[in-house]
Image (cartoon, helix red, strand yellow):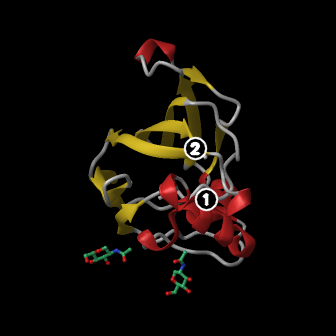
């Protein structure tokens, strides 16, 4: 994923910087530790996601996400980003990178388009919207194959530690789905 710039290939990386802006890439690398979620109604929305090893030092996640509801103004998304220096459950604190609950439609036109899709790239068949997204959002089982974060649109500098991202999707009458990812962030050593 992001770790190819480190190691003894330093000179190759410097060379590559001249061409693809490697220098603007984040100073950190992320190792996913866990991914999972809960749903209050598996026939409306459900998931089956797991961490997978891609190579000796690279990890990603794979699996499926089942979406079987119509998107209307009642569908909301909240993103909670927590960090913990120690990784202890009791140390996790909310960070300012979190996003207050917002309409799913708004979320697709901002966070999803600007950050999520550019990061996932071609590892998924989630819908891509060149122009403004207007519902319907297709009901489908979306696939993820060895997805890794490439750092696009994320802060260039992150403090070492454990980060937990929780996406909470809610819809009427009483659907609540949480997807939770835990990452270990380490500063790259050049
Ligand atoms: C994704 O696939 C498209 C079409 O196959 C290609 O043009 C694009 O460069 C790919 N993007 C990445 C990040 O690999
Ligand atoms: C995900 O993969 C399954 C099985 O290959 C396929 O039937 C389904 O259409 C895929 N989902 C999307 C959104 O393309």
The residue at which mark 2 appears reads as 188
Q: Nearer the viewer, mark 2 or mark 1?
A: 2
Depth order, front residue of 171/142:
142
In the rendered picture of this protein, how many numbered marks are placed on residues?
Answer: 2
Task: Give coordinates of residue 67: x percent, y percent.
Answer: 38, 60
Mark 2, secondary structure of its residue = loop
Q: Is residue 28 left or right of residue 44?
A: right
Kindly identify the residue that appears in the image at 53 percent across and 37 percent down.
Answer: 186
Kindly identify the residue that appears in the image at 47 percent across and 18 percent down.
Answer: 86
Between disc 2 and disc 1, whose residue precedes?
1
Q: Which mark is residue 112?
A: 1
Task: Give coordinates of residue 80: x percent, y percent.
Answer: 57, 34
Looking at the picture, does residue 69 appear above or below residue 40? below
Depth order, front residue of 144/130:
144
Task: Give coordinates of residue 16: x percent, y percent.
Answer: 65, 71
Callout 1: few (<14), some (14-19), or many (20+) C-alpha neighbours within 10 Å? some
Depth order, front residue of 187/49:
187
Look at the image and tell me whether residue 49 can be seen: no
Query: Mark 1: is the Cβ under 8 angstroms from ligand 2?
Result: no
Q: Which mark is residue 124?
A: none
Looking at the picture, does residue 114 appear above or below residue 44? below
Kindly identify the residue that appears in the image at 33 percent across and 39 percent down.
Answer: 38
- Residue projecting furthest to the top: 90
Depth order, front residue of 51/71:
51
Task: Give coordinates of residue 54: x percent, y percent.
Answer: 32, 60
Callout 2: few (<14), some (14-19), or many (20+) C-alpha neighbours within 10 Å? some
């Amino acid at each position: 994923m992001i770790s190819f710039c480190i190691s003894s290939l330093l000179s190759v990386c410097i060379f590559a910087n001249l061409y693809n802006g490697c220098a603007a890439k984040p100073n950190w690398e992320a190792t996913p530790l866990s991914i999972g979620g809960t749903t209050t109604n598996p026939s409306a929305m459900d998931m089956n996601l797991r961490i997978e090893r891609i190579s000796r030092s690279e990890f990603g996640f794979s699996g499926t996400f089942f979406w079987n509801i119509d998107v209307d103004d009642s569908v909301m998304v909240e993103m909670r980003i927590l960090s913990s220096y120690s990784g202890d459950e009791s140390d996790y604190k909310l960070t300012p990178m979190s996003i207050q609950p917002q309409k799913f439609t708004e979320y697709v036109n901002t966070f999803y388009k600007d950050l999520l899709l550019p990061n996932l790239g071609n590892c998924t068949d989630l819908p891509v919207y060149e122009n403004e997204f207007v519902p319907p959002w297709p009901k489908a089982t979306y696939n993820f194959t060895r997805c890794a974060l490439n750092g696009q649109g994320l802060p260039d500098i992150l403090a070492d530690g454990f980060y937990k991202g929780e996406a909470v999707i809610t819809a009427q009458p009483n659907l609540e789905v949480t997807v939770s990812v835990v990452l270990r962030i380490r500063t790259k050593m050049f």
